[in-house]
Image (cartoon, helix red, strand yellow):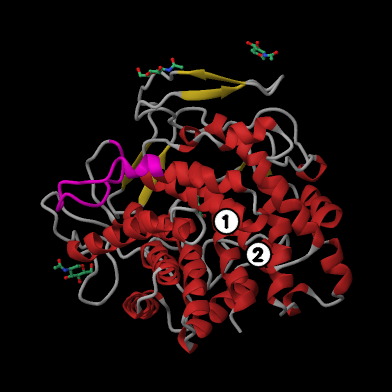
């Protein structure tokens, strides 16, 4: 799976980074411009993008939603024409290809569409509504581990160069509009996965202003909202359709998705209310501990379970509060966000200010992606409520990623403090790239 050095060089020089290099005669280690660093990282990232599946190989289903969000976030702040042409191609291609890779479609009993590759028509069918073996567990170090059905996402077919594909405009291609209308394609029974995709489509909408992407995000959210209500105070959502764990991540994502939609979709008030309802419930659960950081979830009798304060759980809520404050301003949202962000920086940083999760440097494919999600959301908080502590954190992490955690092919690995841990993959690389992207706007 690890791309050969030759392929890597070819792709980097042939596709994206060529003019990056042309502008800069410096050795790469001396590249300090945050945008150039992020562009170079994007060139390396795209080696893993499989246009035939619409996903980034070497990482999982929900992880690819995050990778797509990262590409969108870079496209929001970098006008490089190559990137502006690449990003919409990725969104449209992923929209068409990725549903076939959904690891557990229809498990909640929703009818599905199946796409016919040859004539691009869609037929409705009802899935077997069977469990596929897709599952997410906390291992005995309480690290998230996803188990995929056998042969999931096995690469098929030849390599397709995404830059050779057309940009599918939703207004011009009926098949794209149809695909965008179907939320069931993106539901797999785990509500966090569903909402990662909702956020990814919102990010795609932000870049393209293509309404169908926003509609898709709304429809995914609506489907998840039907699951509202747990045994803990009758509010919040479970981790999954199995209803056996009430935890932080899907609920933070629920807040964030609702708040993002409030600032974009027509029915603002409904989304504001969902976000507020989620926040009120969340604050009542005790998931925020006495240090101000957020543990993984609740015990079966609805008490804080004191499991690991993973970095992504300190991150997602920040972006949610920022968007909620934008939709329905209230100082207390940003005060709460600042308290969590500072507690997290304190708890997760080493003596050089570099963020670590406790699994490092041997996190699995899921844990490898957490830190970048924290960096992304800390950047959002900094834009809304600037603070020198966030600048320091993001810059320290971006610099360390660039100087200590990068190999000669510009692959980025798991340990942001370094040294480079071989091999890097789309989880480790995309996550570290988020620190580079965050550093673009935080100066
Ligand atoms: C597209 O292909 C499917 C399956 O091969 C077939 O059932 C359907 O009739 C085709 N539709 C059109 C419009 O040709
Ligand atoms: C799928 O199943 C549901 C529920 O049983 C039913 O209402 C729906 O009509 C079915 N859809 C198709 C396309 O068969
Ligand atoms: C929670 O976990 C922390 C760190 O693992 C430990 O120091 C603390 O004693 C635990 N608190 C409770 C109430 O179990
Ligand atoms: C990605 O890299 C991490 C960290 O080195 C590793 O634990 C994980 O298994 C890798 N994922 C894949 C799919 O190879």
**From this viewpoint, which residue is outermost toward the left?**
301
Q: State whether label 1 is within 8 Å of ligand 4.
A: no
Residue at 25 percent across and 61 percent down: it is 282
Q: Is residue 292 magenta?
A: no
Give the x, y percent position of residue 174: 68, 31
Left-right relation of 240 to 104: left
Residue 26 to residue 269: above or below: below
Image quarter where the C terminus lies is: bottom right
Q: Is residue 230 magenta?
A: yes
Residue 394 to residue 286: above or below: below
Location of mark 1 (residue): 203
Magenta residues, start to end: 222-241
Q: How far is mark 2 from mark 1, CA to CA?
A: 9 Å
Please state the quadrant of the image where ligand 2 appears. Answer: top left
| Residue 159 in sight from this viewpoint | yes
Residue at 68 percent across and 46 percent down: it is 90
- Asked which quadrant contains residue 309, the reply is bottom left
Left-right relation of 77 to 83: left
Local SS, label 1:
helix
Q: State whether label 2 is within 8 Å of ligand 4.
A: no
Residue 409 to residue 119: above or below: below
- Asked which quadrant contains residue 440, the reply is bottom right
Q: Earlier in the sequence, mark 2 or mark 1?
A: 2
Give the x, y percent position of residue 26: 83, 77
Residue 257 to residue 404: above or below: above
Give the x, y percent position of residue 265: 50, 54
**From this viewpoint, which residue is outermost toward the bottom?**
388
Give the x, y percent position of residue 208: 67, 54
Local SS, label 2:
helix
| Residue 424 in sight from this viewpoint | no
Location of mark 2 (residue): 76
């Amino acid at each position: 799976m690890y791309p050969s050095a030759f392929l890597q060089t070819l792709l980097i020089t042939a596709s994206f980074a060529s003019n990056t290099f042309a502008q800069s005669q410096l050795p790469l280690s001396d590249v300090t411009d945050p945008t150039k660093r992020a562009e170079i990282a994007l060139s390396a990232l795209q080696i893993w993008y499989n246009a035939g599946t619409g996903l980034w190989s070497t990482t999982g289903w929900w992880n690819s939603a995050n990778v797509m969000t990262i590409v969108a976030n870079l496209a929001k702040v970098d006008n490089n024409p190559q990137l502006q042409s690449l990003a919409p191609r990725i969104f449209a291609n992923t929209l068409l290809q990725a549903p076939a890779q959904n690891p557990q479609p229809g498990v909640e009993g929703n009818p599905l569409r199946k796409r016919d590759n040859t004539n691009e028509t869609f037929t409705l069918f009802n899935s077997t509504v069977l469990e596929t073996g897709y599952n997410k567990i906390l291992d005995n170090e309480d690290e998230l581990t996803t188990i995929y059905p056998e042969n999931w996402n096995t690469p098929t077919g030849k390599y397709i160069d995404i830059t050779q594909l057309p940009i599918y405009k939703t207004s011009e291609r009926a098949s794209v509009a149809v695909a965008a209308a179907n939320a069931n394609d993106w539901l797999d029974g785990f509500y966090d996965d569903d909402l990662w995709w909702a956020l990814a489509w919102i990010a795609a909408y932000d870049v393209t202003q293509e309404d169908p992407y926003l509609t898709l995000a709304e429809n995914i959210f609506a489907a998840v909202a039907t699951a509202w209500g747990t045994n803990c105070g009758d509010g919040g959502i479970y981790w999954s359709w199995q209803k056996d764990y009430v935890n932080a991540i899907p609920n933070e994502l629920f807040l964030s998705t609702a708040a993002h939609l409030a600032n974009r979709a027509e029915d603002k008030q409904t989304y504001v209310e969902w976000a507020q309802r989620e926040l009120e419930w969340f604050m009542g659960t005790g998931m925020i501990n006495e240090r101000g950081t957020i543990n993984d979830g609740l015990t079966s009798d609805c008490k804080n379970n004191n499991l690991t304060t993973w970095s992504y759980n300190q991150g997602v809520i920040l972006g949610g509060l920022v968007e909620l404050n934008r939709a329905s301003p209230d100082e207390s949202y940003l005060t709460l966000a600042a308290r969590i962000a500072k507690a997290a920086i304190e708890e997760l940083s080493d003596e050089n200010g570099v963020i670590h999760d406790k699994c490092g440097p041997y996190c699995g494919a899921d844990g490898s992606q957490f830190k970048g999600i924290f960096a992304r959301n800390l950047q959002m908080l900094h834009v809304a409520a600037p603070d020198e502590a966030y600048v320091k954190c993001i810059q320290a992490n971006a610099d360390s990623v660039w100087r200590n955690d990068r190999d000669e092919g510009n692959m980025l690995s798991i340990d942001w403090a370094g040294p480079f841990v071989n091999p890097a993959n789309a989880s480790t690389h995309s996550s570290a790239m988020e620190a580079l992207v965050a550093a673009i706007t935080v100066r």
